[in-house]
Amino acid sequence: MTQNLPAVIYHSLNELTQKNELEIIIRGTFTALSSKHISAIVNAFFLSTKICVNGIPYIAIGSLSLILRTGNSGAERPLVYQGVRGVVSAAEIIEIDGVEHISGPTLRSLIDMRMLQADGRTKAYLEVAMQSYDRILNLAQVRGLKDIFLDDIRNNRPLLKTQRIVELNITSCEFTGTPFLNRQEVEFAHIESVVTNPMLALNINNGVIILKAIHRELTSLGIHDYDGMYNYCKSKGYSTVWSD
């Protein structure tokens, strides 16, 4: 399944740092391995990695054969699109600028799985790939993007209630229709939670204005997404106009 993430900014990895900053460290760690193969792995990351505004890397599927050490077999494609039953699920495909990518956490799980199946030099080169990925995550520039993103959520999340009320002229609970005279009676409840969809954390359309008691019940029931909220409203006889 391919999905487009919300309109966000992506940075090519080679815009954030120089390749030799990463390659020199990796070569120094794996002195017994071919510098040519190490360079190929590092190049694959640099040519195919996009860093999202939240600091999460996305890697183009077309470069995975070098990273996952599948050679010309094409085995990386069934690993991505089908997964391995009982071990790794099929990857969620993210389209960025018309190119299919997988997330960094998904890549990490695929490298882990490949390392369980490999030995000798293949396993060693997979360790190079894993360390390359880990070092990308720890680049100051990448950490900086993540920190700014999290600060933005932390600082602006408290404003969502007022923004939605003012912009949509809301005067009553969106579930029950109960009017409120004081904004302290209601809260902004995310439809897709910040935990499950941080890219929508500050989108006022990704939330509803509801009575505090209802928000507490949603939280206690562990409801974190659209389907859960919609089914909750149907079971309670509440309005689902918010879902249109």
Image (tube, grey):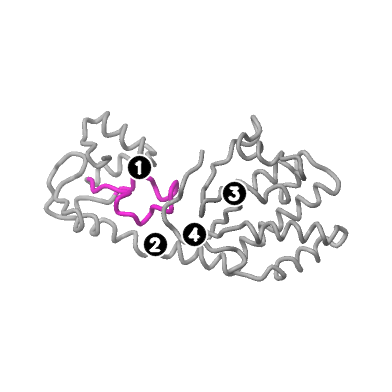
Q: Circle 3 sits in a helix, a strand or a loop, which is it? A: helix
Mark 3 or mark 4: which comes first in sequence? 4
Location of mark 1 (residue): 219
Instruction: Judge whether 243 appears above or below 97 on screen.
Output: above
Which callout, 4 or 1, points to the residue nearer the camera? 4
Disc 1 marks a residue whose amino acid type is Thr
Of labels 2 and 4, earlier in sequence is 4
> What residue sits right under mark 3 in the picture?
105
Q: Residue at x 83, y 43 (%)?
A: 119
Q: Residues within 10 Å of mark 2 (few under 14, many from 20)?
A: few
Mark 4 to mark 1 CA distance (whole Å): 25 Å
Give the distance between the C-alpha atoms of the residues marked 3 and 4, in whole angstroms.
13 Å
| Residue kind at label 3, given as amino acid type | Pro
What stretch of residues is rendered in magenta? 189-210
- Amino acid type, label 2: Arg
Whole-Å distance between the Cαs marked 2 and 4? 13 Å
Tell me the residue that label 2 is attached to: 154
Tag count: 4
Of callouts 1 and 3, which one flags the residue occurring earlier in the amino acid sequence? Answer: 3
**Residue 3 locus on image (x, y percent):** 47, 44
Q: Nearer the viewer, residue 243 or 112?
A: 243
Viewer-side residue, 95 vs 226: 95
Q: Nearer the viewer, residue 77 or 224?
A: 77
Q: Tag on residue 54?
A: 4
Q: CA distance from mark 1 to mark 3?
A: 27 Å
